Amino acid sequence: MNTKRLSGMLAAACVAAASLAACATSASAETTLQRIQRTGEVRIGYANETPFAYTTPDGTVTGESPEIAKKVFAKLGVKKVDAVLTEWGALIPGLKAGRFDVIAAGMYITPERCKQVAFADPQYQIPDTLLTMKGNPKNLHSYADVAKQADTKLAVMAGTAELGYARAAGIKDDQILQVPDTTAQLQAVRARRADAAVGTALTMKGLAEKGGPQVEAIKQFNDDPKHTGYGALAFRPEDTDLRDAVNKELHQWLGTDDHLKTVAPFGFDKSNLTTKKAPELCAG
């Protein structure tokens, strides 16, 4: 074969290969934001924790965080929000593994979690409290009260900030009953496998209503103000463009009548609004 012709064919092949490589690189460089805006679909990961995110008996996924996600992503042109149910402790691994695009579960912003995910600015602030049997038989009003009574057991949802708070207060691991969700917390207290369960005030109040007259949510819980929870949507660290786009919409929408109307069914109101930003909460 003529060497010039061979050289020309090789050159053409190289150009074609380079073109294909460029196309492949371009396709692989599509960000999550670009993909969800192109497809009009986003996947959210959530764990069953009323009122933040949960599945209703008819299979609908709702709660404060999913409903906010639906509204915010609609503003970004995303019409379909698919939801992936995940145990709380598997939410961050699931996000990083690509099972979903955002965690919409009312997850608290903590310095430790900030090392693993990119948080939007918080959409609410809320304190914690305890769920006990009616009358609070062991007179528990703080983590310290639990720590002082070695025979007292506390039901904590695995992977939550409260687990760290309990340990920091001196509660021993053999006093802590780790459970996968809030339903298990309620069952543990009602079955007297735990003397109390701890979680957000709204969650414990909801469990008390669900559990009937046997249980109650403690109204006076003495806690470190630093333990006030600030919940937010969470993204993969490389998806900062998506996080920033969501933040822009959140800042314009949070506190509006539409926002307050959206979260009211879940027990949230103006008192849960906050001006805190993710960077300062990540700094601790």
Image: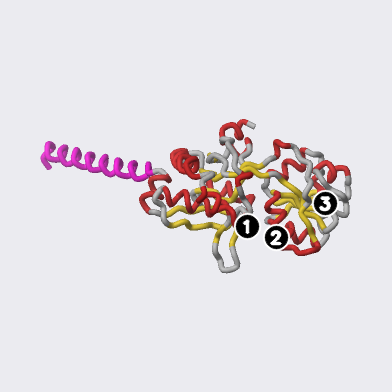
Where does the magenta region start and end? 1-30
173 lies left or right of 6: right
Residue 177 makes an appearance in the image: no
Q: Looking at the image, which residue sits at the far bottom? A: 58
Asked which secondary structure carries label 3, the reply is loop
Quarter of the view holding residue 217: bottom right
* Residue appearing at x 75%, y 37% in the figure: 224
Asked which secondary structure carries label 1, the reply is loop
Give the residue pinned by disc 3.
153
Amino acid at dot 3: Lys
In this view of the protein, which residue sits in the foreground, 220 or 133?
220
Residue 21 makes an appearance in the image: yes
The CA span between labels 1 and 3 is 23 Å
On the image, the x and y values in percent for residue 114 come to 58, 37
Q: Are marks 2 and 1 in contact (CB under 8 Å)?
A: yes
Residue 6 within the segment the image draws in magenta: yes
Amino acid at dot 2: Thr
In this view of the protein, which residue sits in the foreground, 137 or 38?
137
Quarter containing the C terminus: top right
Amino acid at dot 1: Asn
Q: Within 10 angstroms of label 3, few (less than 14), some, or many (20 or more) residues?
A: many
